[in-house]
Amino acid sequence: MQRFLGVAMVAAITAFAVGSVQAGEVLDRVKSSGVLRVATDPAYPPQSSQKPDGTFEGFDIDVATELAERLGAKVEFVTPAWEIITAGRWGGRWDVSVGSMTPTKERAEVLDFPAIYYYTPASFVVHEDAKYTKVEDLNGKIIGTCGACTYEFYLKHNLTIDAEGVPPFEYKVTPGEIRTYETDTNVFDDLRLGDGVRLDAGISALPTIKGAIDAGYPLKVLGDPVFYEPLAVAIDKGDPEFAAEIKRIVDEMHADGTLSELSVKWYGVDLTKAQ
């Protein structure tokens, strides 16, 4: 019986080790290889986007590049689907997500969030011809958003943001139907076809909406932001040394003004503090 328990215990420990990141493993790999692999979105301007020549640009791209430099590494970007990133258990396919991710209780079960690097307002967007005057006018309407993201959680009335300093919010809209997309820009593509053609409205980050409008999309922001979300660097769960080093660097970037400068560069305003 004791032998059986011993074998079972070893098997359990081995299984846990296979499914978890070992302490210091990622940091050691980054230091030895000189490469930081960063998961990002190729179509989420102005946070991140991939240019025709294959290179990337955006706020998250600049933050990730600076993070890699301060780790003594070169940055390498990969573009897995959002649902895959938030599912955790990355298995070493990438080292970190710098992708404007909100640290929710559900995500914290599989990911660690060592540092918040900025806050962004979430807003509703409609076609420029729409007659809505306030967000409450969207009750019962068809609203599009990214799948498995905080905006979908808000529409479902089950959004929980577990972070200090976040302003309280209320659920002001109950959709008649929620349509989810791989990324927010797909929502804008359907919404630009006309008011009510495929969607009545969408919900996204205010800077992303403004980026689409600046790019010529016939859209407009409806009402004031409905909530502010902290956005954090995310890593696979179980590497405290890597988490501590990420936190140290992001804190340093807050203190020396680097994050504020990058925010103003891409958004025209400093979003590094909760509004």
Image (cartoon, rainbow, N blue to C red):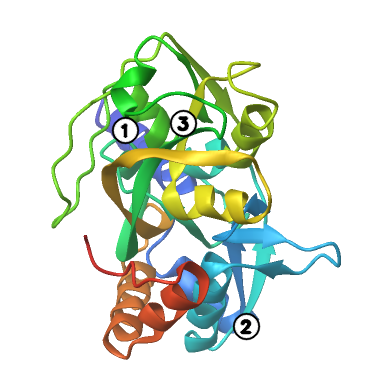
Mark 3, residue position: 148
Mark 1 lies on residue: 3
Amino acid under disc 2: Gly
Cα separation between marks 3 and 1: 45 Å
Residue, x 41% and y 24% (percent of image)?
A: 132
Q: Earlier in the sequence, mark 2 or mark 1?
A: 1
The quarter holding residue 151 reads top left
Local secondary structure at mark 2: loop
Q: Earlier in the sequence, mark 3 or mark 1?
A: 1
Mark 1 lies on a secondary structure that is helix
Number of the label disc, if any, that sits on residue 240: none
Quarter in which the C terminus is drawn? bottom left
Q: Quadrant of the N terminus?
A: top left
Given residues 88 and 40, the one toward you in this image is: 40
Report the amino acid beneath label 3.
Answer: Ala
Q: Which residue occupies the extreme right position in the image?
A: 53
Q: Which residue is mark 2?
A: 34
Q: Look at the numbered discs 3 and 1 and tell me whether their residues touch, using CB distance below 8 Å.
A: no
Q: Where is residue 226 shown, x and y percent of the image?
A: 28, 38
Residue at image position (51%, 71%) is 266
Residue 11 visible here: no
Nearer to me, 123 or 248: 123
Q: Earlier in the sequence, mark 2 or mark 3?
A: 2
- Asked if labels 1 and 2 touch by Cβ distance under 8 angstroms, the answer is no
> Which mark is in front, 3 or 1?
3
In front: label 2 or label 3: 3
Q: Residue at x 28, y 79 (%)?
A: 251
In this picture, is 245 found above or below 20?
below
Q: Which residue occupies 23% across, 35% down? A: 160
Question: In the picture shown, does residue 31 fall above or below 233?
Answer: below
- Residue 18, image x and y in percent? 49, 46
Amino acid carrying label 1: it is: Arg
